[in-house]
């Protein structure tokens, strides 16, 4: 353990983050205190919510400070444990951040069983993105068999699970993704009924054709023009779980007019729509049901899961910028260290 | 019965309706067929939703056609009945329209007991506006004791009931209304904790001061800038039942930019808000509970009810235009005929 390579926030981005907003530095490997564990990072998860933490704006979680290690979910090996119930060699999931070593309270990590599923799944299909898809679709979207479920960012970590659960529940699943390769993956590998490319010039017409009976649930990961197009097709009593707004995360000001709020609210009223935002932290109590259901579907082959792996911590900033630009296909992960020390 | 004076739609309004969009004419008194009743209108209700019916745009109900009698809820006396269970002299509530006489299927009217409450209450506190307030606040808003409930158009038929039920449920009730007279009525006669004048230059500051703990439920009757101001003050897990959008009913195009949709959806996500539109036709099954509760509160003096009465069918167009301009204080009714023939 020569040192702890870590990536800190160097500057608050204005608009799209750049490599200069991050800094790779080497610090001492931290020492675990009472009740704490020393962790060696194996996998780092990169997720769109991190853009929010780079901003000083008030949100549901406190921002990362300048000079502080970037926050992020990790799968790690326990190197030293001062916490009962955790031992050297255990694999755990926690919020270790963008670094090679981390110290966390033992109470803030969960042990994972590497023989059940690949450990990285704890950051994806069996972790926060999977639970987000499960809760947002089932608890907020409440799809009924035969209804049409549309999800944006359909090739991404959350969207790919939303559509596959929708299929399992007997719905028509329509994805929205960027570019023909992602759309082909969503249709052919993930088994959605259709996938529409939001970059296509006739996107709206294609979306309408893919939803001949309208939209009952639109699971919104992106906001912006894509959300507007879906809203226009919503059926009476449609539901719209709002999970993310990647289209607007880098906005430095509101887009130009006209102001479409009256159009949105007019649809909300006339079609009796429900638009509901949610943050997964409010829904941890669903974890046991989620694990049972999604774990079972994974074992049965009814849910497929794809990872997009980047090798090396130093690649994290570029990979994260790529995520915001829609470059990855599947769950974006950084391999920070070997499976075993 | 010399003839049936009635008001028909003469032209589709562009923006705010004008008197020229209506025409008073005299037709033959209609004859009731099998299963039908001949009704003499006593009270005609004027409500903001009628603006929507004057437009050709697709909505939840079909528009009034040019030359057709304007639609509207009425309390009427039965003059002739071919419907079992209804007899000459009965008082009924139904959709008789803007006219002195109407023929309706007996199955489409409800008998009312004029000894229990004034018959006009069936068009207000014990009718569609009251049920709208009850369902929107309790079923969609789900207020808990100690929370802050804000309602716009607080001096109006729906708003005045929303705030009073909020008080009964142990909430802080804050009204929004236009002008000092309405605000004084909302505070002093209706017992809201506060009422803010949306025409005041420092409206936003006043609203914030009136809601020191933020807003948990915003019952939206108006949309527009008032709704934006409330959204900015919503607490985490706040609920926003959307009942009406009178601020935008007369818009001929979307307002100028910036486009505030990303701001609204940003708040929806970060604060986990629920925005839900509703139309009272979907909630008739709540009528028995509503009648029991609100009828009881009326008898106990816990709910107060004010009517704004215009005398004579010919005054209906002007009164309706006044309603859209916020001129009335309390439920707007047109007295079309005497209590008894």
Image (cartoon, coloured by chain):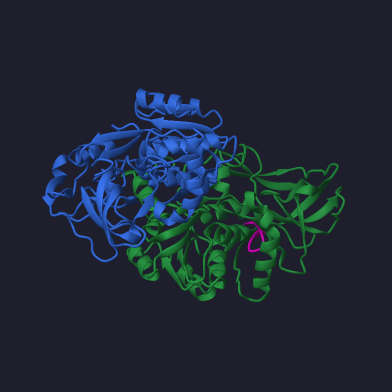
Chain colours: A blue, B green
The answer, for residue A142, to whether it is visible in the render is yes
Q: Taken as a whole, is the magenta stretch helix, strand or loop?
A: loop
Q: Position of residue A331 (x, y in %)?
A: 34, 37
Q: Position of residue A240 (x, y in %)?
A: 47, 44
Q: Nearer the viewer, residue A300 or A97?
A: A300
Task: Magenta stretch: give its range.
Answer: B123-128
A18 w.r.t. A202: above or below: below
Choose top left, top right, bottom left or bottom right for residue A309: top left
Q: Position of residue A54 (x, y in %)?
A: 23, 50
Quarter of the image for the C terminus of chain B: give it: bottom right
What's the residue at 55%, 61% (across, down)? B137
In the image, taking residue B1 as reference, residue A314 lies left or right, namely left
What's the residue at 83%, 53% (across, down)? B79
In the image, taking residue B109 as reference, residue B199 lies left or right, namely left
What's the residue at 56%, 38% (across, down)? A169
Residue A307 lies in the magenta stretch: no
Q: Nearer the viewer, residue B163 or B35?
A: B163
Residue B127 lies in the magenta stretch: yes
Q: Nearer the viewer, residue B262 or B76?
A: B262
Q: Position of residue B272 (x, y in %)?
A: 42, 54
The answer, for residue A242, to whether it is visible in the render is no
């Amino acid at each position: 353990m020569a040192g702890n390579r870590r990536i800190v926030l160097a500057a608050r981005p204005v608009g799209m983050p750049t490599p200069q907003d991050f800094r790779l530095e080497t610090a001492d490997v931290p020492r675990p205190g009472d009740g704490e564990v020393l962790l060696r990072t194996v996998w780092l998860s990169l997720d769109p919510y991190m853009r929010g933490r780079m901003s000083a704006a008030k949100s549901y979680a406190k921002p990362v400070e300048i000079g502080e290690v970037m926050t992020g979910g990790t799968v790690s090996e326990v190197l030293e444990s001062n916490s009962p119930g955790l031992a050297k060699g255990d694999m755990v999931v926690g919020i270790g951040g963008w670094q090679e070593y981390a110290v966390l309270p033992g109470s803030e990590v969960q042990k994972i069983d590497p023989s059940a599923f690949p450990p990285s799944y704890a950051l994806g299909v069996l972790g926060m993105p999977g639970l987000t898809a499960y809760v947002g679709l089932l608890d907020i979207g409440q799809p009924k068999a035969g209804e049409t479920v549309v999800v944006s960012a359909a090739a991404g970590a959350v969207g790919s699970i939303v559509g596959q659960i929708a299929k399992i529940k007997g719905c028509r699943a329509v994805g929205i993704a960027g570019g023909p390769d992602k759309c082909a993956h969503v249709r052919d590998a993930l088994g959605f009924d259709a996938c529409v490319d939001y970059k296509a010039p006739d996107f709206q017409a294609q979306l309408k054709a893919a939803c001949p009976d309208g939209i009952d649930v639109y699971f919104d990961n992106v906001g912006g023009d894509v959300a507007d197009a879906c809203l226009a097709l919503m059926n009476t009593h449609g539901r719209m779980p709002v999970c993310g707004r990647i289209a607007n995360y880098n906005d430095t000001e509101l887009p130009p007019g006209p102001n479409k709020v009256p159009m949105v609210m007019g649809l909300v009223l006339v079609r009796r729509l429900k638009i509901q935002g949610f943050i997964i932290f409010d829904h941890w109590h669903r974890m046991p049901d989620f694990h049972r259901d999604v774990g079972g579907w994974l074992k049965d082959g009814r849910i497929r899961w794809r990872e997009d792996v980047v090798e090396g911590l130093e690649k994290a900033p570029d990979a994260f910028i790529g995520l915001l630009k829609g470059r990855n296909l599947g769950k974006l992960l950084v391999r920070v260290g070997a499976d075993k020390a």
